[in-house]
Structure formats: structure tokens, C-alpha cells
Image (cartoon, rainbow, N blue to C red):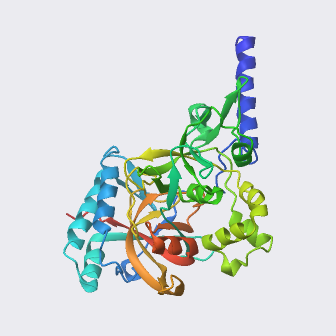
Amino acid sequence: MNPWVNKRYNSIIVLAVLLSLLFAGCALFKKGPPRVRETALIRIDSSEYPEFSDDMLYDGLEHGILQSILYLNKVPADRKFRFGEDLFDAAHMIKSMEHFLDFIQTKPSIQDLKKYIHSNYLVYRSVASSNPGQVFFTGYYEPSLEGSPEETTEYRFPIYARPSDLTTINLSLFLPEFKGKKITGRYTDQTVVPYYDRKDIEYKGALDGKATEIAWLKDRIDLFFLQIQGSGKIYLNNDDILHVHYHATNGRPYQSIGKLLIDTGKIPREEMSMQKIRAYLHDHPEEVDTVLNHNPSYVFFKIEEDGPIGYLEVKLTPGRSIALDRRLFPRAGLAFIKTVKPLINGSGEIHKWSAFSRFVLNQDTGGAINGPGRADMFWGDGTYAEIAAGHMQHPGTLYFLVLKPDVF
């Protein structure tokens, strides 16, 4: 082998080794969760099927199913979707959805629903995490915020579009060992370096001339929580309305400010909620910079005609769309959950949590939704959605359904 070629080949191998060693600690990489099993579902016997019922009486379910079918029609018909040890192609997924949709349009009784599922569907349960079968449910919603298309003395905090110098590299294009691995950074001086963190962006003007301001908000805290939710509706002071949706992140690891406030004794764990965090920050303005900068991750947005749009690029359905780890669960799949929801009194306060079950669709994902024991429920918009999303931190169970191969 030519000595120069041999030297170059060895350099590539060394680079690959260095990348693999740095992967867990370098902020350049999108940090993923610990390695998890290939599948998060196990098929259960019909004797183990849960008691199927739907607290929403199927309202919104047709819309959710049609959105999943919309996604499935865009992928190759032979694309495989994993349910435990079993694989089903997109064509079968569509048939599974269509038959379930036809049936629920008859508004079946609980008993008829039970018979139909037992006769026609395979059911898989999430293996969850430390507690067998228990999935930890949180919630998210679509905030509505006041904004301006221009910076003013009142509207000072920009919602940024994706910066022109943000670079994402798919490492699997270079070495198969890095399948599914990406890095996000910026190209400078003939090398790729980590992208600017939250502090650089918000306090040091790192994006000046590099990113378009979609709109401007009044409050830095509102902007932070817009990034956490991933989408929102902006009512501009010129009477226009913008639907903004997650487009990219700076690639920095997500750090929970809620955990920070618990660990530092600022908010008791049993009282933790989005509303408590907001209240604490508004009551302690001198701590806002420190607390928000604890999370170096930063989200960039794009404008959609409608919204909110999930990871599958279809419109989310309030109460029916959930976000799961996209590596583990079948995308667009029909699921069934059992957990609790808040009941609100006339003062807008939670007076109790009530058990419920319903059919949902796996249509979204999230930076903090990692592993088989996490699920995030999309509650929609409005007061109830904000309360439910802000306070939901409860265990539950998660199942997936798919039509038996020999049916119809």
C-alpha cells in the first residue's frame, strides 16, 4: 500500500476511535440516553389484555388515526415497524388503522370493543423501566403568547429561526459503527466545533447576523418555556397569528431546571410543576439568568401554516397524540394508555386526579423523552391544557395494538 495512503487510512481509524471515546463527554454531540434494548414492547396473551375503555368517547380519535395514516402513506409500503419481537410493514399498519377506525365510528360499547380487540388485534405492553409495566407520564401543550414582528422596548426577546452556520453531521455516512449518531455544531477555521450554548446566544449576541428573528416576545421566561413545549401560537400586535414549530437545536445536552430547583432546595419535589417554576422565577428575578443558563440547550423554530406539528410532520391531536422515544416504539402506532388526569375546580385549581384510559397515537418525540419508561401527553391549548401539562407527573401503563396478520 502507498505509504501516504496507509498513513491517511490510519488517521481515519484514529479519528474514529477518538470520536467514539469523546462521544459520551463532548458537548459537540447530541447526547443520547444510556443504551436501551432494541425494543420496548412485549406481546401479551389475550388473558392479560387490559380493560379497554375510552374516557373521551372516541372524540378526536378519528382525526388522530387519519394523521397517522397520512404519515404512513408517505413512507415506503414495505418499511418495517417493530412491535416487540414482531415486524409489520407500513401497508399492514395502514390496514390496522383503517379497520380500527371503521369499528370505532360505530361508537361501540365497552363490551363490543373488548370482543373486537380480542378477536382481531395483537396487544403489546411497554416493558417500562424500574417498576415493571409502569411508565412515567408527563404532559405538554401549545402555549399562546403575545408577540411583535419587530423588536421594541416592550418586545425584546427573539424567537430565532435556524442559524445559517448551524451544521448537522450524520456520522453513519462515514463509518457504519456510528449508525444513528449525529453531531451538531458549526464550521469554523476548517473544523467543526460545538455550537453556541444558551448563554452565548442570549447574553453575548452569538447569533447576530446568523439567524432571522421570527418574532419578538415580552418575557425571557415565556421564550424558555416555548422552547420546552416545542411549538406555540404567537398573536402579533399587527393582528397576524404565527404558528411556530421546533426546527432544530444547538446540539447541547438538555438539563432540567426543575431538577436544579429541587436539588438546591428552592422548590419541594412534591410541589414541582411548570407553574411553580414560573412563579419562582418571577419572584426571584435576580436568579433568572443562572437558572435558565443551567440548560445550555437552545431550540430554533420555523413557521407552519397550521399547528402544532409533531415529529412525524403531521398535526397533533389534543388528548390523542403522545410523544415517546422514537428509537423504541413504532412510529404512528395505535396505543392505549391508563394513567390519571387532573380535575379542575371553578377557581382553575386542581382538586383531584382521576384515573382514565384512552386510545392514543405515537406521533411525537422529545429531548427528555428517553427509554421505555417515559411518555409525554399532548393536551392541546388553553387553560386546562396548560394546567394538565404543567402538573402531570404520574405513573401509568402503555400498550400498542396492531391487527393480527391473518385477519381480513
Residue 262 appearing in the image: yes
Q: Residue at x 66, y 75 (%)?
A: 272
Residue at image position (53%, 55%) is 230
Say if 239 sits above or below 54 in the image.
Answer: above
Q: Quadrant of residue 5?
A: top right
Q: Which residue lies at the image location 61% right of the left edge and 35% below the top edge?
A: 166
Which residue is at the front of the view, 313 or 87? 313
Quadrant of the drawing holding the C terminus: bottom left
**In-front residue for pair 195/284:** 284
User: How many labels sit on residues?
Assistant: 0
Q: Position of residue 156 (x, y in %)?
A: 63, 49
Q: Height in image: 48 above or below 31?
A: below
Q: Percent x, y for residue 2?
A: 71, 11
Q: Nearer the viewer, residue 165 or 281?
A: 281
Q: Nearer the viewer, residue 306 or 111?
A: 306
- Residue 205: x and y, percent? 71, 39
Q: Quadrant of the N terminus?
A: top right
Q: Residue at x 47, y 62 (%)?
A: 142
On screen, residue 89 above or below 389: above
In the picture, measured across the screen, residue 122 lies left or right of residue 19, that is left
- Residue 226 in which image quadrant: bottom right
Q: Is residue 30 left or right of residue 200?
A: left
Q: Is residue 326 visible?
A: no
Q: Residue furthest front?
A: 153
- Where residue 297 appears, as percent x and y from the top left, is 66, 50
Asked which quadrant contains residue 197, the reply is: top right
> Viewed as shown, does residue 369 lie left or right of 99?
right
